[in-house]
Amino acid sequence: MRPNLLVRAAFYFSLAAIPFLRLYVPGTGERLGTERVAQLLMLAAIFSRPRVCLRFVPFSLLWFCAYCALRIISGLWQAPEYSKLWWPSSLELLQFYLPLTWLIFNVLHYPKLGHGGLWAFVIGVSVCALLHAAGIGVAEVDQGIDGRSAIFDQNANEIGEIYGVALVALVALGLFRNTKPKLRFVTFPLAGLVAIGLAKTGSRTGTFFAVLGILICFLKPRPLSQGSSVTW
């Protein structure tokens, strides 16, 4: 069994769509948007190749499920009146990130798909950073007092963390021995663009992710191979 076109499309699109999950078609009441398309693609991929997508269950997935359950139980116990604040993000973890984690873990067992997945992710984040820098879909945070901004109804810290992880992925792609020289040079302007987006969010957590991840990449004693665990 090999990943078919549908599995690869769901894998690449879901990674590229991470910064755009709260982007919906106007007038649909948040029923039709990027997240729904990604969910439908993942569901179709699972039905088309269930053994490819779900064959292995990562142990970390059990901890992920436990965290989601604890988050919901804690919310129901301590702040049921604020369910409009914590329930949508908890539901997003269960509906999107949990199945995506399971799908990624299984698809990465096949050669070369990990490298393509990194490119899909950084291209999606780079497009988001470009729109952020251009002021498209941007919203000021804290009434603009700190000069921080978010994009596409994302929390400033969440999108900042996505930018931080993308910076690490770009550095890893630049260090890969298998990355073509032309593509290696592309990582520099993309990294600069993502760094601008990160600066606009003012996210300290995103900055910490970026600095720590880049240090780990540079401290590795030999060039990164395509299947290196550092990038994932």
Image (cartoon, helix red, strand yellow):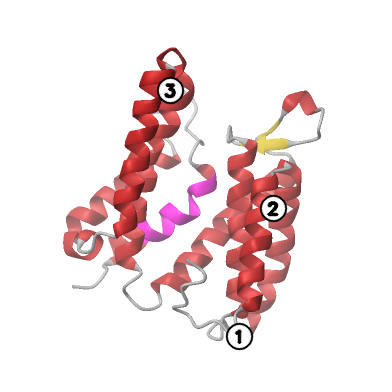
Q: Residues within 10 Å of mark 3 (few under 14, many from 20)?
A: few
Q: Main secondary structure of the magenta part?
A: helix
User: Which residue is rendered at x = 24% and y = 59% of the image?
Assistant: 57
Give, as a single range, the part of the protein colored magenta: 9-19
**Mark carried by residue 207:** 2
Horizontal and vertical percent for residue 76? 36, 20
**Numbered marks: total:** 3
User: Disc 3 on helix, strand or loop?
Assistant: loop
Q: Earlier in the sequence, mark 2 or mark 1?
A: 2
User: Disc 2 on helix, strand or loop?
Assistant: helix
Judge whether residue 163 can be spotted in this image: yes
User: In the rendered image, which quarter is residue 6 located in?
Assistant: bottom left
Which mark lies nearer to you, 2 or 1? 1
Q: Are marks 3 and 1 in contact (CB under 8 Å)?
A: no
User: Which residue is rendered at x = 65% and y = 50% of the image?
Assistant: 206
Confirm whether the magenta stretch covers residue 52. Answer: no
Q: Are marks 3 and 2 in contact (CB under 8 Å)?
A: no
Q: Amino acid at mark 1?
A: Pro
User: Which residue is rendered at x = 42% and y = 19% of the image?
Assistant: 78
Horizontal and vertical percent for residue 108? 36, 69
Residue for badge 1: 221
**Mark carried by residue 158:** none
Residue for badge 3: 29
How far separated are the C-alphas under marks 2 and 1? Answer: 24 Å
Q: Earlier in the sequence, mark 3 or mark 2?
A: 3
How far separated are the C-alphas under marks 3 and 1? Answer: 51 Å
Confirm whether the magenta stretch covers residue 15. Answer: yes
User: Disc 1 on helix, strand or loop?
Assistant: loop
Q: Nearer the viewer, residue 185 or 216?
A: 216
Q: Residues within 10 Å of mark 1 (few under 14, many from 20)?
A: few
